[in-house]
Image: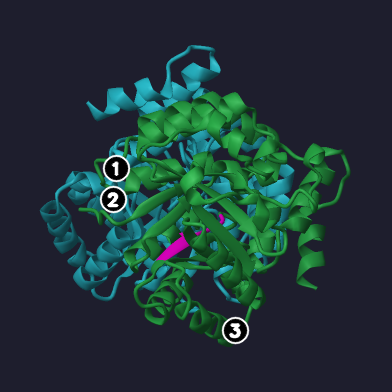
Chain colours: A cyan, B green
Amino acid sequence: MYRPEVKILDVTIRDGGLMNNWDFPKSMVKEIFYGLAKAGVDYVELGYRADKRVFPPDEFGPWRFCDEEDIRDVAYTCDTKIAVMCDVGRTNQDDFIPKSESLISMVRVACYVPEVDEGLKLAQYMKDLGYEVSLNLMAVSTVKESQIDEALKKIAQSNVDLIYIVDSFGYYYSEHIRYLTEKYIHALPGKAIGIHTHNNRQLAFSNSVEALLAGAQFVDCSLYGMGRAAGNCTTELMLSFIDNPRYDLRPVLDLIERYFIRLKEELKWGYELPYLVTGVLNQHPRTALAYIKEQGQGLQRSLRDFYESHIR
Amino acid sequence: MYRPEVKILDVTIRDGGLMNNWDFPKSMVKEIFYGLAKAGVDYVELGYRADKRVFPPDEFGPWRFCDEEDIRDVAYTCDTKIAVMCDVGRTNQDDFIPKSESLISMVRVACYVPEVDEGLKLAQYMKDLGYEVSLNLMAVSTVKESQIDEALKKIAQSNVDLIYIVDSFGYYYSEHIRYLTEKYIHALPGKAIGIHTHNNRQLAFSNSVEALLAGAQFVDCSLYGMGRAAGNCTTELMLSFIDNPRYDLRPVLDLIERYFIRLKEELKWGYELPYLVTGVLNQHPRTALAYIKEQGQGLQRSLRDFYESHIR
């Protein structure tokens, strides 16, 4: 049993890029795209398209910007569609060409709840260019419910088709996720809901499953969970969960074996205790990332001290 | 909000011992017991009490046997109670002294569903010695539902107070766990239900939470998830979930920092792809353990090959 309308969107390069400054070799990204296409993954997000006036190109890998020619070097038109993300306030609209001339199918607009007006404006711009568009409302665990309701009212009146619940801090339990999914579905008739989770409390996969069972249609995941800090719901777990015969786990096992086991040892995303601490306390993982970097440089500060400095 | 009757039982030494042949230094086990007592953990399982006629003592660490004098060297009588486990068919009843003379509070009898008669007999023997007793029905995901129902009928007529649902292969989703927990509660009026999970699909914690929400009273967990293969629900996640002011996360952070981060790198329990494969396919992790050992010895066999040899 599966719902054919459910779509898997792999965010490895985009969210994983937060751990390596988007510095993936082109040959690797090409193999990843081809492998994910063989696995039947519905969408592959190849990175951000960030404003080069804000982010100097020589300080970042290519997938921070996703130039059309870079995309063309690693991907092709097939059943697996290409997505890129852009952030409100960090995007130059002029960097986007009409969909008819681009390999990109979907543009995902990310914003915080207070920025929803700008988010919807940017989304409409992308829609007018011909793209599928999602609006990804980040860090909803940190705002009042009334603010979420207010934002959903505005979104309901827009013509964005897909809205993501984003648990940026890896804070939510399954009951929160079910509640939010039902709230979004109820507030946004005719629109699809997506789920994007983080694994601070080892709940990324189970919360993603919960959202799907509650009616979400899009689910984000990444190879071996690669993503900022505690990482994401893993693509391999999601493929093993959904019975759609379109999916094949094997090309994903190949990719993880070839690249991601070693990469994880080096970059240390996933379940690590500093990320657990920020997740439990509903805080941004930046202090945990800094703490882990410190430890790697030989600085000694106990986990207890890290924890106590966060509960104060 | 918390239910005061919910009890946390730490299985680090017992289930973790499956990864290091129960070869924990006494000083370490002592620090673990003292730390878990400071953290407010309700029960600490110090190992198996296995039959020395079946398991030659010189081939195993001391926590395979949990001699009374070894327990006395590492633990003391306090609010944190001591548990040991014994397996049907691998236990010498004469190794157990009356509860009044022992530091042990609880004996956990482990058996497979077809062995339930022997399990109940052994449980009654321990009960007669004065111990709290649990019956841990292992690998229930591999037997027919009618066999589980049959076993539960027999257990209902016994005077064992605590029965564990054991997801030995890390196969279940939360809906299975809820279904089983409700089934056990319904079939076993007046008895407490416990939950023991494995993390093959990153569901150990979420499934444990689900069982508690469905009415389970006892939950197994281990420090940093240390346990066979994919390991267990982690003690630190469970302490962060339950709001009981009795619990303190900090001594557990100290223990993990001191011992378990390094130990995990060495022994490789936790979310590893071969364990995902056996979990997804509802199979014993022994082939995955052997595969990982092979890889450590430099033998090359692809994950794809491992997977394909299991789905055939």
Is A105 situated left or right of A244 in this image? Answer: left
Q: How many marks?
A: 3
Pointer 1: what residue? A88
Residue B61 lies, with reference to residue A215, above or below; the image says above
Q: In the image shown, does B283 or A258 lie closer to the viewer?
A: B283
Q: Quadrant of residue B115?
A: bottom right
* Chain letter of the residue beneath label 3 in the structure image: B
2 or 1: mark nearer the eye: 1
Q: Which residue is depicted at the point 78% across and 57% down?
A: B287
Q: Determine the CA span between mark 3 and mark 2.
A: 59 Å
- Tell me residue A90's x, y (percent): 33, 36
Mark 3 residue type: Gln
A276 to B137, vertically: above or below: above
Q: Residue furthest right?
A: B299
Instruction: Tell me the subunit letter for badge 1.
Output: A
Mark seen at residue B147: 3
Q: Residue at x 61, y 83 (%)?
A: B144
Q: Are marks 2 and 1 in contact (CB under 8 Å)?
A: yes
Q: Neighbour class for label 1 at 10 Å: few (<14), some, many (≥20)?
A: many
| Residue stretch rendered in magenta on the structure | B193-198
Other residues around mark 2 within 10 Å, as few (<14) / some (14–19) / many (≥20)? many
Q: Is residue B239 left or right of residue A253?
A: left
Give the percent coordinates (x, y) of residue B29.
56, 31
Task: Identify the residue position indicated by label 2 in the image.
Answer: A122
Say which quarter of the image contains residue A34: bottom right
Mark 1 or mark 3: which is in front? 3
Answer with mark 2 or mark 1, whichever residue precedes in sequence. Answer: 1
Residue A72 visible in the current orientation:
yes
